[in-house]
Every structure is written in structure tokens, then in C-alpha cells.
Image: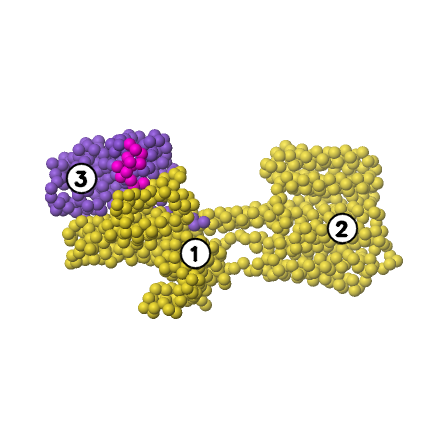
Chain colours: A purple, B yellow
Amino acid sequence: MITTAVIDDHEAIRLGMSAALQNHPGHQVTLVDGAGTVPEFLERGVQADVVLLDLQLDDGSDPLDNAESLIDAGYKVLVYSIADNVRLLRRALAGGAAGVCRKAEPIAVTISSIEAVAEGQVVISQEILAAIEGDSSYVAANLGPREREVLALYAAGFEVPEVAGRLTITENSVKEYLKRIRVKYTNVNRPAASKLDLFRRAIEDGIVPPVEPHQ
Amino acid sequence: MNAKPKTSQLSAWVDRGVALFCLGTLIPAALAATDQVTYLAPWWMLIVGGGIVLASIGMMIASFAGWQLRSFALSYVTVVTFGLITWSAAWPADTVATGSPWLWMCLGVASICLAVTTGTGWGFAYAIASGLLFAAVRMTPSGQNASLLGAFQDMIVLVMNASVVIVALGVVSNAFKQLDDAEAASRKEATDAAIEEALLDERHRLDGIVHDEVMTTLVSAAHQNNDPHVAQQAQRAVERLAEAEQPTEARLPVTGDQLTWLVTDVVSALVPQAKFTSQLHNLAVPQPVASTLGMVVREVALNVAKHSGAENVEITLTSPEPGGVAISVADDGVGFVPEQVPKRRLGLQVSVVYRMWAIGGKAEILSSPGRGTVVNLSWVPGEQPVAETEQQPRRRRSGRMMLDIPDLSRPLLARLVWVLVGLQFLLGWTSLDQVTSIWPVFLAQGLAAVATWLTLRHADKSQMGFRSAVAVTVLLLAVTMIVQAVLPTGHWPGYATWHSNVVMVLLVAVLVRGREHVSWTGVGLFAVISAIWATTHDMGVGDTLRAGFGPFSWMLVAQLLQSWLIDMGDRLRASRRSSAAANKAIAESFSKLVLRDVWLTQLRAQVGPLLNRIADPDHELTEDERAACLAQESRLRDAMRAGNLVTELTSDAIDVARSRGVDVRLVDSRGTRLPEDVRTALTRYLGRLLTDSSTKRVVARAAPEGYEDVVTVLAVRDDGSSELVGLDASGRVSTR
């Protein structure tokens, strides 16, 4: 039995999750609570193994703070988002979120992610590693050449066995590399709001190609 | 539009100054001429005297009416030159003149006229040529039978005076030109920055709506069975979009730069290989016209992208007539026969021709198979222009306004001061026969040289030291007294009074270098000392004034010029401030237009119908509609997360591929805009890959900056084989 809760400012999403879990039998996940903000959720002191955390909440809170305060309160955090804004995703990872799951994905994928996180695993996905890869100053300062190679291939879209095949190492060592990169990222407690970050932020938040003078 | 100080404004002032100078010269010239008029032939007085007066008045009128000064200035020069050449002929052969020909005053003015209208080089050349000619005339009886030395002295003074004024005009005009250029550049930067800032704001607003309302609705609807909450959520999304679409009150005209931006933005999203040339300046079109032009250009670009298969696409924006816009889109694609396009395919007809007609514009489509297509769009303001189009510069000046003085920097000015002082020394040496003792002259010149050196020391700093200024003044007064001690009594000693020009030049330099009080005190003391000398040496009133007040009047001119420059600077700053505010308002208004008429129109066309069906509580979504929800969500997600990697056409291809079950993922680890070559190459490569039926999975990723490959594309086929290609910064594709 795994208990989970959704923190999302859209009621439709919270209700949708509950309906989806009911309509999809054969799993151990139960939705026990839903809230619009992290403080609101923490106040209730609900028992839950995994908290699904939306990246953009109505109160404008920072995913890093949200993830940290949830983890401090003993929850495991799985990011549950729509468009995976890279900047916000990086902040959530730095705050210790164990993985990311897209709302548009089939419910089965969400369930298996919840189960994995509940067991204490970190979820490895291309999404997460591409977000880490995009933080170039982190990569340059903290990763060794082999780690960078693995990261680049994985972020380019190769699956673990393909990465292993290309680098002639075992699949397990590829997984180890990826996990290490992932955990290191949280331990270094990345995204400081550097000037470059602020500049990128504007572009990352854009919906259409970045605004630049057309010259 | 905002008031911008322009070179044309400055040149109007220079024109007026020159005209005033011509007119002003008439007064001393007339005084000098009173003694000579009786001797001069009437025909000469009629032609030359009358011509000079007429040309001077003409210049004055022209300069204030905004006409070209050129023809009047050239007639002035011609008349004066003619007068100088024929002077001896007009003078009675048996009489020796008692003074220098009065015409000399007009010679300097003529050089200045020539410099202003035809170029500095001509001005200098004329000064030298007329100086030589004048020296020759001076040696004839009609020119007072001057000695070679005297004629030579006159020539030097003539050339020198003209040169000083020409150079001063050059400095002023050059400074203003630079200021104008800098101003124009910073204005453009400010406009761009303001637009970008305002656009980012708008985009964040739209992003918020898309993310929080639209995408959330689509995901919820895809996963849930007709939950009333989802319908409510959809209703809210529709409302939020409608809210964003509300027209705002401020509908300021769109500037040329903004229109260029709009067209570039719209087209490059569809046709990344397009090249743009824009000559839209000083233009303001009403917003409805700008937004129609944007939509029409979008339609044309869509046609190019879908049907032409063109390699090269060129977009040209020009303004063939005042206030009008012409946009031409030329491609080298397959082309078509316009008459054979079925009437039912209204595409270009309605969306291009009709829309242009509706705003009072014209569209022309030229195409033939194999020859590419050219679409010409044009719009001119009607009888009642909705927006005040900016006043066109009255007339393009054909004259070269002092452009041939490249850069009158401080070192050059410092050298000029040395040259001027040196020339005075020369005049002093040529007048050594006038003085009672020679060595004090050389002592005075030594001291004057020290004063010059002190004045120009550290000329790179704008203000000179107080002590140096005082020292210069003291030295100059000492020079004055030494020179005066050896001057003769009873008659004007000619150029032996070289020192007064040195005092003038150096005190003006002290003034310009920021020591006004010191230099004015110096000039006052000089006037007093000179007046005392003149009265104690039996000089007439005229000579007393001449000795004491020459430097004084030049100082006055310099002071006025300086205040004028400072005043212009203030006005410039004020106009800069007001144009910054105007900029901001225009940028905000423009970005709202872009949001409303470009982005929102696209978004509404894309998701509007689907949202309305979700919002309808009585409508039960079909399986297909649920799938469409997810497809639309993916598309919006691609645009939001990896807009860098896709154009609208690629998105269409991705939709189709995804519906076939192909797993397409776009990842942007770069964040900043891709080079155009890469975008073009990527669009082509993805297009091929997505239509290949053996493709099973595609991952396109923009690598972080600093990677050798700007973009990598991984393709996995249904037989399990995979291929990774990289696109380098020039768009070259190679297998990794």
C-alpha cells in the first residue's frame, strides 16, 4: 500500500488523479489528500509516502523551497507537471525531488513512477538529464569526462542499452553513472540565480522562439 | 513623432549663421567703402556692390525659408571674385588709393560660403587664391601701392581669418554629426530593448494562460470522462484567452522598425531560410494596417513553405512613397500559373488580395511554372491618414556639409592654435621696421610661446588648471606691455601689434577650456592696458577701439558659440528623455498588437474549437477528441519547451507522425536562439525523417552552447537500428 497526495492549484487535476487511480485497477497506490499549496498541505500533517508536486503553483512559490520543505517533513517528492519548464525543473531537482512525471503521460506511467519513488529510487528520465545537461556551468565544474559522455548520449535520446553499446560498457554502469549524476546534482544544490540564469529564464519561459533582434 | 534633433536642423543654423555673417560684413565694408566709392566706376559699384547686397539678403531669406543656400552663396562668391579681378579697372588710373580695398572684408566671407556649400577643400583653396590675388591688387595704385611685404602680410591675415572660421564651422558641424549618429544608434537600441522587454512581458502573460489554463484543460479532458470540473476548467481557459484578446485603448501607430520586426517574426517561424532587407525608416502606419500586413505576409509565407519548395526566399520592405509601405516576397520555387489556380482554392485570393484591398492596399502575384513567385504588397496612406506620418525631411541636402573634415580631435585643434600663434609671430617679424627696438619683440614672442604651451598642456583633460590659466593671462599681459613699450607714437604701427591676435587666440582657448572668469578678466585688463597705450601714444578713437576691443569681440563670439552648444546639448538630452518615454509607450502598444493579432490568432485557430467542445457540458468527448487533446497538448508543449527546434510546418509533420504512432521528442538544452542556417537545415532534415514510414522514434535535441554539434537528431527505425546525426553551426549534417 502506497499513499500519495497531489499538490496542484488546479482542482481538475487533483480530481482527475483520484478518478484515474480508481479507473485503473491492479496497483497499490491510494490518493489520500490534495492541496493547492505546500504550506496548506504541511499544515494538515497528512500521512503520505509520495507527494506529487506541480512546478508552478498559484502562490508563486519556488520549487526548490517546496521540495526541500516537503522532504524535511519526511515526504518523498515526485514532480508532476505540464510543460516541464527546465528552470523550475532544475530547481525542484536541486531541492531533492526524486523524479519527474508528466501529466499528459498515461496513468500507468505515473503509477510506476510513484511506486519507484516510494521504494526510495531516484527516477532517471531523459527529461531530467537533459535539464541537468543544459546547466552547462554545473556540468563543466562537476562531471568527469565519462560522466559527460554518458550524459550527452542519454540526453540526445539514446536508451540505456544503446548508450552502453556505444561506449562498450555494461548497462548497469550506465545506470550507475546516470544515478550518480542525478544525485550529485541535488547534493551540489544547484541553480543559484546567476545572471546567466536570469537571462536564460526569460527565454526558457517563452512559448515561441526566443525574442532576439532580427539582425 | 518625437522631436529629433537632426543634422538638417543644425545645418539650417549654420546657413543662418553664414547669411548673418554676410549681412553683418556689409556694415564695416560700407564704412570702409565711404572713402572709396567716389573713385570707383559706377558700373562696378552697381554690379559688385549691388550684387553683394542682393546675394546677402537672398541668403538671409533662403536660410530662414529653408531653401537651398547654394545658388545665393555661389552668386556672392562670383560677384566678389569678379569685383576683385576688375578692381583695378574700376579704379581711376591716375589716383593712388589711401586705404586697402574695402572688398577684402568680403573675401573671407566668400571662402566661408564656398566651404559651406561646396566643401571645405574649395573654401581653403579659394581663401588662398583670393589672398594671392588680393596681394597683387594691393601692390597696384588702386590698392594703395603696398609694398611686397605689406601685401604678403595682408594675404596671411586674410587666409588665416577665413581658415579659423572654416575650421570652427567644421568642428561644430562634425560634433553635431557625431552626436546625431550616436543619437540615432542609441534610439534604435532603446527601441529594440523596449520592444523586447514589452514582448517578454506579454509572452509571459500568454505563457501563463497557455500553461495554467489551456494545457491543464487538455490534459484533464484527455484523462477524464466528462467531469463537470473539466468543463469549468475549459470555460475558464476560453475566458482567459478572450480577456487577453481585448483590444487596449492605446493603439499607437506602428513604426517602420516594428513593422520589420513583425514581418521578420511571422515569416521566420514559417520559412527559416528567408533573408530580409528593410529600408523602412521614418514611418508610422496605423495598427490595423500593420496587423493586416502581418497576417497577409504570414499567408504568403505559408504558401511559400507549403508549395514552393524554394531554396532562397527574399523579403524586401521599402517605402517607395512618403508614408507608404511595399513588401515583396520573392522565392525561387516551382511557381505556378496564377490563372489556373482553381477558383475554389481561395487561399491567396481571399487571404491576400482581399485583405489588402480591405485596408486600401494592393497585392500583385507574379508567377510562372519553374520561375518562382513574387508577391508584391503595397499600401499608401489614404487622403485621411489615420496616423500622422512623420514629416519628411524638407529636402535632402545635396551639398557636402563639411564632411571632408574627418575628425577634428583635440590634438588637431592644439596644432591649429600653434599655427595661428606662429603666423602672428611671422607678422611680427615682417613688421620689425615699425618698432623702436627689436629684441623686446623676440622676448615677447618667447613669453607668448610659453603661454601657448601652458594653454595647450594636458589638452586631453577638458578643464585646465586654475593656476595655469592665471599664469597664461599674466604672461599675455606681460607680452602686451613689452610689445607696447617698443611701438611708435603717432601712427598705427600695422602688424607690429601682432600680440593682440595672440592674446585673442589664447584667451579664447582658455575660455573653451573651462576658465571663463580668468579669460574674461584677462581680456578686460588687456582692453584697459591697450586703451591706456592708445591714448598715451596719440592714437585716434578708432585705433583705440581697434587695439582694445578686437580680442574682446572675438571672446564674445566664442562665449556665445559655447553657450549655444551647451544649450543644444540640454535640448538634446530633453528630447532624448521624452523620446525614451514615447518609445516605451509605443513598444507596449506594439507588443499588445503582436500578442493579440499574431500569437493569439494562431493559438485560437489551433485550440479554440477543441476548447469550446470541452467547455460544453452537454458534449461528450469522443475517443478521437481525447486523442486530439493529447496531440494539441504535445504541440503546445513543443512550442513552449522547444520552440527553438520547430517551425509551424514541422509541427504539422510531427502531429501526423505522432498520430501514426511515432514517438517524437524535442529537447532544448540550449535556451538561446539557434543560428538560422541550423534552423533551416533542421527543418529539412526533420521533414524527411518524419515522412519516412520506417521511422519509429525521433529525438531532436538542441545541445548546450559550447558543444560541437548545435543540434543532434536521433532516429530509431522499426528494425531497431538507430542513427545519430549532428548539425554544426553552419547547418552541415553529419553522422555521429
Above/below status of A184 relative to B560 = above
* Residue B98 appears in the rendering: no
Q: Amino acid at mark 1?
A: Val
Q: Chain of mark 2?
A: B
Q: Amino acid at mark 2?
A: Gly
Quarter of the image with the N terminus of chain A in it: top left
SS for dot 3 = helix
SS for dot 2 = helix
Residue furthest front as drawn: B719
Instruction: Name the residue beneath numbered marker 2.
Output: B131
List x then y, in percent, for residue B648.
Answer: 33, 53
Write down the quadrant of residue B624 in the picture.
bottom left
Q: Amino acid at mark 3?
A: Ser
Q: Which residues are magenta?
A: A156-169
Q: Residue at x 74, y 41 (%)?
A: B424
Instruction: Name the residue beneath numbered marker 3.
Output: A112
List x then y, in percent, for residue B440.
Answer: 79, 34
Label 2 neighbour load within 10 Å: few <14, some 14-19, many 20+? many
Q: Mark 1, mark 2: which one is toward the viewer? A: 1
List x then y, in percent, for residue B458.
Answer: 62, 34
Instruction: Name the residue beneath numbered marker 1.
Output: B313
Whole-number angstrom distance, CA of label 1 to CA of label 2: 61 Å
Whole-number angstrom distance, CA of label 3 to CA of label 1: 50 Å
Q: Residue at x 72, y 52 (%)?
A: B126
Label 3 neighbour load within 10 Å: few <14, some 14-19, many 20+? few
